[in-house]
Image (cartoon, rainbow, N blue to C red):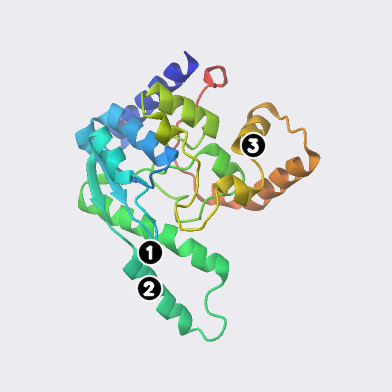
Amino acid sequence: MKAALLRDKCIAWIRDWFAANAPGCSAVVGMSGGKDSTVAAALCAAALGPDKVTGVAMPAEGQSLNEADLICKHLGIRYICMPIGGIESSFRELSSRLGEEGFSRQAEQNIPPRIRMAMLFAVAQSTNGIVANTCNLSEDYVGYATLFGDAAGSFSPLGKLCVREVRAIGHSLGLPAIWVDKTPDDGLPHSCSDEQKLGFTYETLDRYIREGVCEDEATRLKIDSLHRRNLFKLEILHIPAFVPESEDLV
């Protein structure tokens, strides 16, 4: 019941936000094939109509579509595929010109999401569109997003919703469980899940965010440390977001 109410309020918020800030515009969503972009696109389609949503898949070199094309087809939204391997190659060439050190590992990891966001804004500006931020509160809380990359966007349907709430809304929307409950990862060969990289589960993180409970002290300290170190990202990017009421949370 709460999931349905949360879903309907989020849909109404998107519809109202577009009416007030971007009347007649469409939503542009970067489609990774993960639950967040899938749920965000579905919410936008419900709020604006499928004809007012464009899903853009931008696989990196060696990265699969992760069913982004099938998801867009299921939602009935426009689908565009724009691989970024060639652009990544240009950055690797630039890195080689810096000498022996080249780009740092962190800089290399942040290049693809920043390329993708630049492409999304180019698509949006060319199609009378507005770029959706698809990050959720759980990721943002510990800084698991790239500043001016996937952390950017013009409006945020999921930015104040934890992973468990995003999944509940996804199920309430009638999306296939295989997409809503998909294990979050970067889609690259031989990579590991987001939770393995973080060192704790989203279930643990969500409970700590919503209830202030974390039985493992080492995990609590790690979450607190990540949160403090990454607060600047949220301070820089003040994206309009749907804010749920506490009694509606699931």
Nearer the viewer's eye, disc 1 or disc 3?
A: 1
Q: Residue furthest right?
A: 217
Marking on residue 205: 3
Helix, strand or loop status at disc 3: helix
Above or below, 83 relative to 50:
below
- The residue type indicated by label 3 comes to Leu
The front one of 232 and 229 is: 229
SS state under label 2 = helix
Against 16, residue 118 (above or below) is below
Report the Cα–Cα distance between label 2 and label 1. 9 Å
Estimate how packed mark 1 is, as few (under 14), some (14 to 19) or many (20 or more) residues with alpha carbons within 10 Å: some
Query: Mark 2 Cα within 10 Å, few/some/many (few <14, many 20+)?
Result: few
Residue 212 visible, this angle: yes
The residue singled out by tag 1 in the image is 61
What amino acid is labelled 2 in the image? Ser
**Which image quadrant is residue 15 in?**
top left
The residues bearing labels 1 and 3 have C-alpha atoms spaced at a distance of 31 Å
Q: Amino acid at mark 1?
A: Glu
